């Protein structure tokens, strides 16, 4: 029997370095599906954001230099788009502007 749990992982004021969302890394014997990844611009100007899947060694872009309007958001994962994470994987986000992005990542964990 495997347990399913829906969870939110959040990170505020992301800036110019790739930041793992809530320092979340998939644990061993856990299957995780990202069912939503929303990046909000908390500034008064357009920002450009990157979101990556990190496999423990390399970053693979989900979006790169994606513009997010002032006060708006970008849904990088959601709807029909899902991302499967394997043990050791994480999602990282960065902006071209300091302390400018809030992120909500919704996941389904199967343990």
Image (cartoon, grey):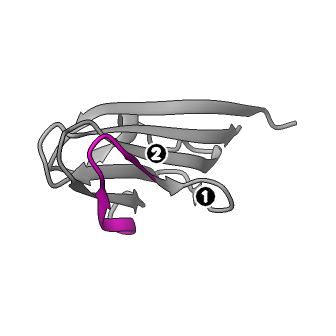
Residue 70 vs residue 61: left or right?
left
Q: Which secondary structure class fits the magenta region best?
A: strand
Report which residue position mark 1 lands on.
Answer: 84
Q: Horizontal and vertical percent for residue 91?
A: 41, 51
Measured along the vertical axis of the image, is residue 61 above or below residue 75? below
Q: Horizontal and vertical percent for residue 58?
A: 33, 66
Q: Residues within 10 Å of mark 2 (few under 14, many from 20)?
A: some
Q: Is residue 58 visible?
A: no
Figure quadrant of the N terminus: top right
Label 2 SS: strand
**Residue sitting at x 31%, y 50%:** 93
Single out the mark in the foreground, 2 or 1.
2
User: Closer to the camera, 59 or 51?
Assistant: 51
Residue 64 among magenta residues? yes
Q: Horizontal and vertical percent for residue 57?
A: 33, 63
Measured along the vertical axis of the image, is residue 55 above or below residue 3? below
Residue 76 vs residue 93: left or right?
right
**Residue sitting at x 49%, y 47%:** 37
- Distance from label 2 to label 1 (Cα)? 16 Å
Mark 2 / mark 1, whichever is N-terminal = 2
**Residue sitting at x 49%, y 40%:** 105
Q: Specify the segment rendered in magenta.
A: 60-74
Contact (Cβ within 8 Å) of mark 2 with mark 1: no
Which numbered circle lies on residue 38? 2
Which of the 4 image quarters holds residue 85?
bottom right
């Amino acid at each position: 029997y495997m347990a399913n749990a829906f969870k939110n992982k959040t990170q505020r004021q992301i800036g110019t370095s790739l930041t793992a969302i809530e320092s979340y890394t998939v644990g061993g014997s856990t299957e995780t599906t990202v069912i939503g990844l929303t990046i909000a611009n908390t500034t008064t100007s357009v920002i450009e954001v990157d979101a990556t899947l990190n496999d423990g060694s390399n970053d693979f872009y989900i979006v790169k230099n994606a513009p997010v309007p002032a006060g708006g958001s970008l849904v990088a994962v959601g709807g029909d788009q899902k991302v499967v994470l394997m043990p050791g994987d994480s999602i990282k986000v960065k902006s071209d502007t300091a302390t400018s992005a809030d992120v909500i990542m919704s996941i389904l964990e199967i343990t």
